Image (cartoon, coloured by chain):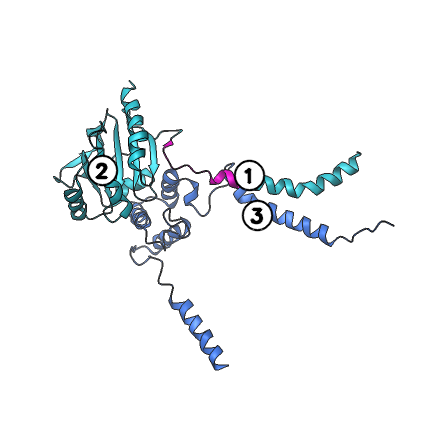
Chain colours: A blue, B cyan
Amino acid sequence: MWQKGKLVLAFLLVVLFSNGVRANFAEYLFDDSEKQQQYESMLKEFRCVTCPNQNIADSQAPIAIAMREEIFRQFNEGRTSEAISQYLLSHYGDYVSYRPLLKRQNALLWLGPGLMLILGFYLWVRQSAPMTVKA
Amino acid sequence: MNFSQVSRLGWKVFPAILIIIIMLALYKALDLDHKFQHLQEPMPFPEFSLIDIRDNKTVTIEQLKGQVYVAHIWASWCVPCKKEHIDWVELKDKLKVPLVGIIYRDKPEQALTLIKQKGDPYYFLLNDNAGKLGLDLGIIGTPETFVIDKQGLIQFHHVGTLSLKEIENELIPLVNKLKDNI
């Protein structure tokens, strides 16, 4: 029992402390807390284009670091979140955003899960329907 | 076959059709050809003002206007870039247009060491330390290569390394074709 407990504890410690990647918010600080929040939000909304499974906040890829710096610079220049988002989208396309606007090109991406859900429900209903045995 | 039978048949094949449509759409989305993307809507090469690391002089896009050139983004910390560098040096004389090197978020001294050791094929060798030009170009990593026409429009964009053969057999002919277009 104690052996199992040790294993579980070791596993938990590994899971909790092995993730050395922390969001890089402390690098760039604004005096204005609202701006800081907007900045931090934005870093989480955009994808690292070198490491697509990470957002800009977490990635250490040079492009992600450059993006963090550029977004910080643009916020400091007084640009709005919308303008900065537009800048990134115009240079990288919808792919860079975790929340792209619904368009014809990405309609399947947005509607696909719903369609699959409908399909799954339909198959489940058909599976559950009692079989008619012909005499 | 009456309506009821057609309807029942339709409901039977509907899941299969839906799955096929989704699979085809996903398959099409995989077809991302990064090699020599001939841009459907060429965009202008972004304005820039960067320092040439060899003589510390400022270079702007004005100095390249009116001519065809190749812009190559790389870094000394990028292993594939260093391998590709040798090919650019080898083909330096065959490429009859300026090759503008742009080091991306790199230490200039390390880039200078590389070109001293391996050769320097660059017309300009610019320092994009902040990575701003890279962002304006929409790069996703290094190396990336752009071919720009006389109007300053990016006509071709290649993501990743180019082999000696690809530079010689694909890029150089493209560049020559753009040079000959009036």
Q: Nearer the viewer, residue B95 or A60?
A: B95
The quarter of the image holding the N terminus of chain B is top right
Mark 2 is surrounded, within 10 Å at the Cα level, by few (under 14), some (14 to 19) or many (20 or more) other residues, namely many
Q: Position of residue A21 (x, y in %)?
A: 36, 60
- Asked whether, in this view, residue B28 is left or right of residue B173, the answer is right
Mark in front: 3 vs 1: 1
Q: Is residue B35 magenta?
A: yes
Identify the secondary structure beneath mark 1.
Answer: helix
Q: Judge if badges 1 and 2 mark residues of a common chain.
A: yes
Say which residue appears at 38% left-offset and 68% top-offset: A17
Say which residue appears at 24% left-offset and 38% top-offset: B87
Kindly identify which residue carries mark 2.
B101
The amino acid on which the numbered mark 3 sits, given as a three-letter code, is Pro
Q: CA distance from mark 3 to mark 2?
A: 45 Å
The amino acid on which the numbered mark 1 sits, given as a three-letter code, is Leu
Say which residue appears at 39% left-offset and 40% top-offset: A89
